[in-house]
């Protein structure tokens, strides 16, 4: 429902009022239900961005542990394979579960409020503690949340972007990530390639039988 308000005094009173918006020189009065829906949507978006930032911060803390092959990115399935050392390092009281305090007290995290969000998300059943399975599930969900091209691999620039903006990288950046991956061989492939080259080089210097 719109009302044209022509009196300048009413216009001055209206400035800054959350239920009012200006369009093309006219004053638009938004129905209260519409305003509430908009505020809820904005709150949900903010919450989602905060969850993304929290996941990115937590993954950044343990990036090297997850990338144990040292290939420069977290590969598909590595959270399943390497979550146990992360759990043991976080379980400072050896209770076999993680408390909110144990997560929030991480000395290497810059934003404690994001760690609080991390624990709330990690504690899926709401019992006030996080089990090893809940930690593993949170790591996998976080990787999926910030994986810009949905191929299962997460790079440092994806973690950094999500930590800063609360969003995934753009499509262009995701494509650049894929190209970078294709140009980089895992250590075992580099080792095999180097061994093969060395063997061929040695064969070239072997005396030929006549």
Image: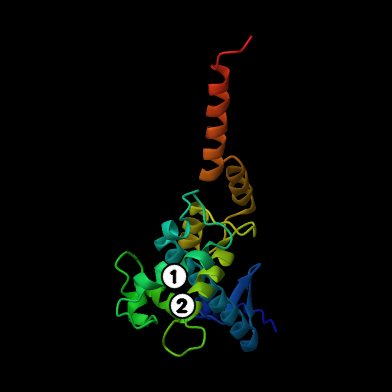
> Reading the chain from its start, which is encountered first: label 1 or label 2?
1
Q: Nearer the viewer, residue 11 or 185?
A: 185
Colour convention: rainbow
- Give the x, y percent position of residue 159: 49, 58
Q: Kindly identify which residue carries mark 2.
A: 132
Identify the image quadrant of the N terminus.
bottom right
Q: Kindly identify which residue carries mark 1.
A: 84
For the residues marked 1 and 2, what is the alpha-carbon distance in whole angstroms? 7 Å
Q: Nearer the viewer, residue 88 or 174?
A: 88
Q: Is residue 80 visible?
A: yes
Q: Is residue 7 visible?
A: no
Q: Is residue 23 above or below residue 148?
A: below
- Give the x, y percent position of residue 118: 44, 75
Q: Which residue is located at x 60 percent, y 54 percent? A: 170
The single residue placed furthest to the top in the displayed view is 210
Q: Nearer the viewer, residue 131 or 166?
A: 131
The crowding category of the residue bearing disc 1, from other C-alpha atoms within 10 Å (few below 14, some 14 to 19, many at least 20), is some
Dot label at residue 159: none
The crowding category of the residue bearing disc 2, from other C-alpha atoms within 10 Å (few below 14, some 14 to 19, many at least 20), is some
- Give the x, y percent position of residue 83: 46, 68
Circles 1, 2 touching at the beta carbon (< 8 Å): yes
- Give the x, y percent position of residue 92: 30, 76
Count of labels shown? Answer: 2
Identify the image quadrant of the C terminus.
top right
Q: Nearer the viewer, residue 164 or 25?
A: 164
Q: Secondary structure at mark 1?
A: helix
The single residue placed furthest to the front in the displayed view is 210
State which quadrant residue 10 falls in: bottom right
State which quadrant residue 21 falls in: bottom right
The single residue placed furthest to the bottom in the displayed view is 127
Q: Is residue 66 above or below residue 130?
A: above
Q: Secondary structure at mark 2?
A: helix
């Amino acid at each position: 429902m719109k009302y044209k308000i022509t009196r300048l005094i009413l216009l001055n009173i209206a400035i800054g009022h959350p239920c009012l918006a200006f369009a093309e020189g006219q004053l638009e009065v938004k129905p209260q239900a519409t305003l509430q829906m908009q505020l809820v949507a904005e709150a949900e978006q903010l919450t989602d961005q905060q969850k993304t930032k929290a996941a990115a911060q937590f993954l950044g803390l343990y990036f090297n542990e997850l990338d144990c092959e040292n290939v420069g990115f977290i590969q598909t399935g590595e959270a399943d394979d390497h979550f146990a050392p992360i759990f043991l390092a976080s379980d400072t009281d050896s209770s076999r579960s993680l408390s909110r305090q144990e997560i929030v007290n991480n000395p290497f995290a810059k934003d404690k409020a994001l760690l609080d969000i991390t624990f709330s998300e990690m504690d899926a059943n709401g019992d006030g503690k996080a089990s090893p399975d809940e930690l593993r599930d949170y790591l996998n969900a976080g990787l999926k949340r910030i994986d810009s091209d949905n191929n299962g691999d997460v790079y440092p620039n994806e973690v950094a972007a999500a930590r800063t903006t609360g969003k995934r990288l753009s499509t262009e950046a995701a494509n650049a990530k894929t190209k970078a991956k294709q140009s980089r061989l895992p250590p075992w492939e580099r080792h095999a390639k180097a061994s093969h080259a060395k063997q061929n080089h040695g064969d070239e210097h072997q005396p030929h039988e006549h």
